[in-house]
Amino acid sequence: MAVVVPFPAPKTPSVGNRAAAARLFDHLEPGERLIWADRPDAWAVVRDRGFMVPLWIGAIAVPLGAVLALAAGSGPAYYAGLALLVGAVVIASAAFGFWRRANETVYGLTDRHILVLRDGAIPRLSATPADRIAWIDVVRQRDGSGAVTLTIVDGSNSGTELVLGGLADPGDVARRVVHAYQFDAPHLV
């Protein structure tokens, strides 16, 4: 038998980020109510994807590669310098891609769905029905930011995960989900 544990209410009853909410209003179904909306912290997403160490390595590799390539003129040092420069450009491009994608993403919680809007060159909206959420998990970093992972159960595909990453306060988002959909969530305490 499941034990019902009281779960504290969200810190604030507001919608959250009003600019993010404005981007979602056009995507709501008639009568659907927006409870919360926000966008991920782009640098938290880059950090969580494990790009901070490569970015620091790239920051060292660029000047080192430039010095080796320019000073050597030719030979192994020249090619090592070029390899460092190319590697740093690849790392920076990947990190920039994650940063840009996070800036184009908006998360929303309605009384019926979890919404993820990716508003890039080709806008995409993912609307996950609330009744398909089977499990909620919170992952926190040292600074308190993190992600909320929602396990989705579907008739044909069980155990799919929807990750809302780069959140400043993932615990608050999880509380909002629990309260919005009346979950019994003792694992979040």
Image: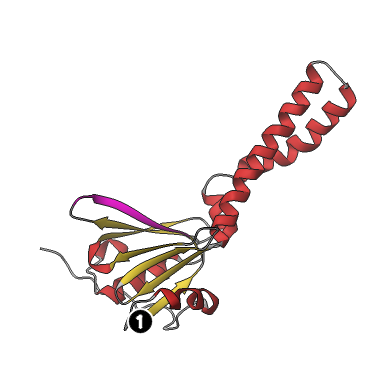
Provide the secondary structure element on which disc 1 rests: loop
Which residue corresponds to the image point at 88% horizontal and 28% vertical from the top-left?
70
| Image side of residue 97 versus residue 115, left or right | right
SS majority, magenta? strand
Q: Is residue 57 visible?
A: no
Question: For the magenta stretch, what is the residue range?
Answer: 156-165
Quadrant into which the N terminus falls: bottom left
Instruction: Please say if 21 is above or below 54.
Output: below
Residue 104 appears in the picture as rendered: yes
At horizontal 72% and vertical 27% (from top left) the residue drawn is: 83
Q: Picture coordinates of residue 158 (x, y %)? A: 22, 51
Residue sitting farthest toward the front: 122
Q: Which of 112 and 177 is in front in this view?
A: 112
Count of marks, rendered view = 1
Residue receiving disc 1:
33
Q: Residues within 10 Å of mark 1 (few under 14, many from 20)?
A: some
In the rendered image, residue 93, in percent from the top left (x then y), is placed at 64, 44
Locate residue 188 relative to residue 92 in the image: left or right.
left
Relative to 101, is 110 above or below? below
Q: In this view, does 186 lie to the left or right of 34?
A: left
